[in-house]
Image (cartoon, rainbow, N blue to C red):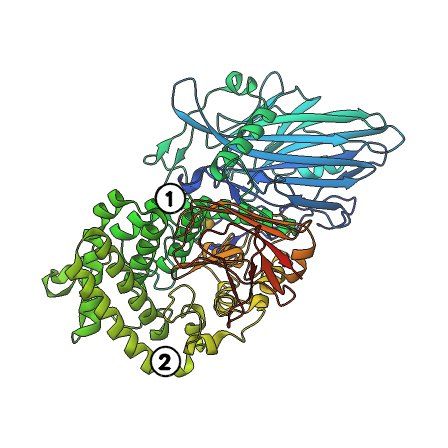
Amino acid sequence: MGRTAAIAVLTFLILSPKSGAADRIERTSPLNPRGRIHIAIGLPDTVDTLKTFVEPEGCFSPGFATYGIHFWLYDVEGKRLIAATMDGVESHATLSPEGFLVPRTTLNASGVSLLTELGAVRRSAPSGEPMVLVGARACLTNPGERERRMALYVALRPLGPAGGDVRRLEATEAGDALLVDGHTALVANERPASAGVVATDTIGELAMAGAMPAGRSAESATGDCAGALRYDLTLAPGQSRELGFICPVLAGRRAVGHRWDGKNPWAQLDEARPNPAVGGVLQPDAGVDCYRSIKAGEVIEEANGFWREFFGARAPVVTPDERWNRAFVAIAGHAAMTMNEGAPDVAVINYNVFNRDGVYMANIFQKLGRFDLAERAIDYFLAHPFNGRIYPEADNPGQILWIMGEHWRFTRDRQWLARVYPSARKIAAMIRYYRTTPGPHWVNVASLEFGQALPPEKRQEFVPGRCDGHHPEYTEAFDVAGLRAAALMAEAIGEKDEAREWSARAEALFAKYDERFGDRLPREYGSYCVLWPCRLYPLGESRAFEAFRLIGAQASASWRYFPLATAHQGLLAGNREAAWKTINEHLEHEQMRGWFVLDEGGKSGAGGWRFARTTWNGDVAMPHGWAIAELWLLVRDALLFEDGDRLVLLAGVPEEWFREGVIRVENRPTHFGRCTFEYDRKDASLSIAGEANPPGGFVLRLPDSVKHLTTPDGRRIERLGGGDFVLPAECREVRFAF
C-alpha cells in the first residue's frame, strides 16, 4: 500500500472544496489519504455526520467534514518517515476477528510493526447528554533482535478521509491534547514527548525531517492549521508499547441531518452544510479533563461489546472459509451503518433512500434477526413511498409490499401487522389503480394517496415501467410479488375478501407477465428479479427453472449488484456453482479484502462530499448498500433458503466443504422460526435444532458425491427425483454416505 517516499521537501496541495466531487484534493503527497477504500464506523441509525470515516491505511476523520488523524513512524537511526500510505511500506487492514466494525491497520517497516485499532461508542457526558467517542490504540512492537529507536507522530490535519477546515488549532499546556476551533479534538492517554501546531498544513514536511513545530497555537483564515503529538520510543528486542487516544466526535459542533435538494433527476445532492450556525444537534464538549479519564482500550472493547450484542453471543455462521464467516458479520454491520435516523440510505453521505436498494438492506435485517431496524426501514417506506429520484418509479409500491410480506413471514408479529396493514391495503389499491385503469395516473411521493382525489399541486405522474429508464420486466415482477404479499397479510389479519381480491389480481397480472416476458425471462432486468427476490414461478420445474438453471458463476462487474442478483437466480434454480463461485469471486475483489465492502461499480451520487476536505472521489459510494446486500443475501441463501413450505439447506456451498471441517448456522431466522444446524465432517453428520418446523420438511440439496443419508435408527433416505433429500418431519439428525 502507498508509495515509496522520496526524502525531500514535499509540496502539499491544500484546497477548500467548492461545489462538487470534482473538487476533491489530488493526492500529491505520499502522506495524503489514498482515497481508494473507506468505511464508516459508529452507531447504526444515527445521523450521518456523527459517523467516522476510516481508510485502510489507518487514517480517520472523527465525524464528517472535521479533520484527519494520521499515524506516522519516524526511524530515528535511518532518518526516514514511514506511513502506510507510502508505496514500499507493507501494511494491511482487517476488522476484529469476528468481523465487527472495529478496524485495524498493521504496518511493518524498519524492523518494527505498528498496529492501530479504532472503536466508536456512545457514552453520556457529565452533563447527561449523549456523546460519541472514537478510541484509537497504537501498539508498536519490535520483533527483532536489536534495539530500535522510533518516533510516533499522531498528526491532525485538515485533510482526512472526511476532513474539513481547521481555522484554529491549539495544544494544551500539558501537551497531551489538541483543540480545534476551541473544542477538544485529540486527547492522549499518555503525555507525549512534544506537541506542536502550525498555521499551514506542513506538518508532514516537518515529520519528514524528524522535526516538530514549536508553536502551541495557530490560526488560518483558509482553515489550513495542522499539528501533531510526538512520542520518542526506544524498543528493546521483543518489546511492545501501547499508546491510546480519545477523539470526541463533533465536540462543540452541530450534527446536522441531510437536506436533499429534490432537483437532480439522477441523484440528489445534500444541501445541508456541516456544522451550521443554527440547526442540527449541538454535541457536547466534555472537556479535556473528562476525556483524559477515558482509556482508549476500554472504548475499543466497548465497541466490540456493542457489536457482539448486536449480532448475538455466538458467531451467526461458521464455515471452512473464514472470509464467508467475517463477511456475513461485516456486511451486515455496514448495512446497519447506512441507517440514518430511520432512513435506510443507500450509502453514508452519498445517497438518500432508494426503495430498490433499501428493501434489500431491510431484508438483511430480517434475516439477521434485527427486526427493529427492518421495522424502522419499513416505516420510512410507508411514510415516503417513492424514494430515490425526484419522480416516482414504478418498482416502489410492489417493493414495499414485498418487504412487508417478508417481515410478516419472519416475525409473525400480529401487533405489527395490525398497525401497518391499513397502509398495505392502500398500496395494493394503488397497484390495482395504475395497472387496471387508463392513464395518466397520479401519485404523491410523500403519501399513500393517489388518483384524481389528489389536489393538482400534489400530483406527480406515475409512468408504468419507469425504473432506471423503462424496465417493465422488473417493475411488473414486483407488482405481482407485492400483491401476493398483500394477500398473505390480508389473510393473516382476517380480511378474507381482500385476500381473495389481491390474490386474484396478482395471478391475473402474473398471467400477463408470463405471456409478455415468459420466453425471455433472463433478459435485461429480468435476471435481477424473477426468482430472486420475487419468486414469480415455482423454483422447481417451471419456465423460470429452465431459464435460470444453467446460470453459473458471475464475475464482478460495473453495477456490482447485477451479477450477484443474476447468480441468485441460478442458485434458486438449483445451480450450486452460481452461489459459491460467485461469492468467492467477489470475496477476491480488492475492495472486499479485509473490510468486505463494494462500491456501486459506476458513478454514484455525490451527496454532501463537496463539503469535505478529502482525496475521496465523491462520485464513489462505499460501502454501497444494494451491492453489499446482494452479496450478503446470496451467502445466506447459499446456506439456507425458503422454498414455499420447505427449508432448503446447503444448496450453494462448495462440495469440498463437506470433507474439510464444520459448517454451522446459528439461530438464524426463517419463515418457519429460528433454525440452527451443524455439519461435522468428522462423522459426516448433520444435526438440526431450533424452533423451525417447515410443513414441507427440511430439504438437503447436496452434491452428487453424497449417495444417501442414514438416520440414527438406521433408516436410509434416498434422493428424490429432482436430486434432493427430504428429511422426515421428526428427523433432526442424519449421516452422509459418500
Residue type at the position of mark 2: Phe
234 displayed left or right of 317:
right
Which residue is at 40% across, 59% downward?
696
Disc 1 secondary structure class: helix
Q: Position of residue 516 (x, y in %)?
A: 33, 82
> Residue 187: where, in percent of width, then height?
58, 24
Left or right of 267, for residue 432: left
10 Å neighbourhood of mark 2: few (<14), some, or many (≥20)?
A: some
Q: Residue 537, position in %: x, y? A: 38, 71
In the image, taking residue 581 as reference, residue 599 lies left or right, namely left
Q: Residue drawn 35% across and 69% down?
A: 467
Name which residue lies at 57% across and 24% down: 298
Across and down, in percent, residue 720 comes to: 51, 69
* Residue 18 visible, this angle: no
Q: Residue furthest right?
A: 145
Point out the tag, 2 or 1, that comes first from the N-terminus.
1
Identify residue for label 1. 371
Disc 1 residue type (three-letter)? Phe
Observer able to see residue 244: yes
In this view, 616 is above or below 513: above
On screen, 234 above or below 280?
Answer: above
Contact, CB < 8 Å: mark 2 with mark 1?
no
Residue at image location 55% in from the left, 40% down from the top: 101
Give the spatial CA distance, label 2 vs label 1.
35 Å
Vertical position of residue 521 compared to residue 50: above or below: below
Q: Based on the displayed image, in which of its 4 quarters is residue 123 positioned?
A: top left
> Which residue is the site of mark 2?
517
Nearer the observer, 88 or 675: 675
Q: Name the foreground residue: 253 vs 598.
A: 598
Q: Quadrant of the C terminus?
A: bottom right
